[in-house]
Amino acid sequence: MVRPQHQDPTPAELEVLEAFWKDERPKTVRDVKTALDRNRPRAYTTVMTLMNVMVVKGLLNADTAKRPFVYSAAVTETKAKSRLLRDFCARVFNGSTDALVEGLLREVKPNSNELRRINKAIEKYAQTKEGIQCESSNSCQAPSPVK
């Protein structure tokens, strides 16, 4: 029985997408292979097959009117990473964002600068979303920062 194809990018597909996101210009297979070879050499046919699978999955667009074919990213970095993060949170943490963040902090052990940026992001989120806790129209506060 054939395993169903997952629509989210695999680690290898993310590497290909990173090449497009870094420089948003359309690329040939050779352009992508050159970018990927900086980390680890790959066969041209391997990169070509991977990119063709990505077209079928809707991750890349292909302009087949030109020779060689020219490809472009069909998904933005933000959209792809958001989808992966939501899927990861749902599968691994049963949708619990607090468990996800606690686990991330425990395992990654961010330094004080990173914690400061995380706290700013939490404050910004709390101010722009329904995360603000208001007792009256004059007294609103964001949830306590991460320590």
Image: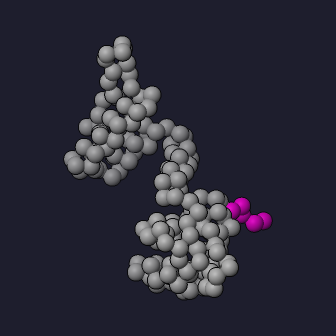
Give the color scheme: rainbow, by chain, secondary structure or one colour: one colour
Q: Position of residue 65 (x, y in %)?
A: 68, 79
**Which quadrant does the N terminus fall into?**
bottom right
Q: Find the magenta span and give its range.
A: 1-5
Left or right of 6 in this view: 108: left
The residue nearer to you, when weighing 82 against 31, is 31
> Is residue 26 placed above or below 126 in the rendered structure?
below
Residue farthest toward the top in the current orientation of the protein? 136
Q: Position of residue 140 (x, y in %)?
A: 33, 21
Instruction: Answer whether residue 2 is magenta in the image.
Output: yes
Left or right of 32 in this view: 131: left
The residue nearer to you, when weighing 39 against 120, is 120
The residue drawn where x is 40% and y is 81% is 38
Q: Position of residue 53 (x, y in %)?
A: 65, 71
**Which quadrant does the C terminus fall into?**
top left
Q: Position of residue 88 (x, y in %)?
A: 52, 50
> Is residue 143 placed above or below 136 in the rendered structure?
below
Question: Is residue 23 in view from this perspective?
Answer: yes
Left or right of 31 in this view: 133: left
The residue nearer to you, when weighing 95 against 84, is 84
The residue drawn where x is 29% and y is 34% is 145
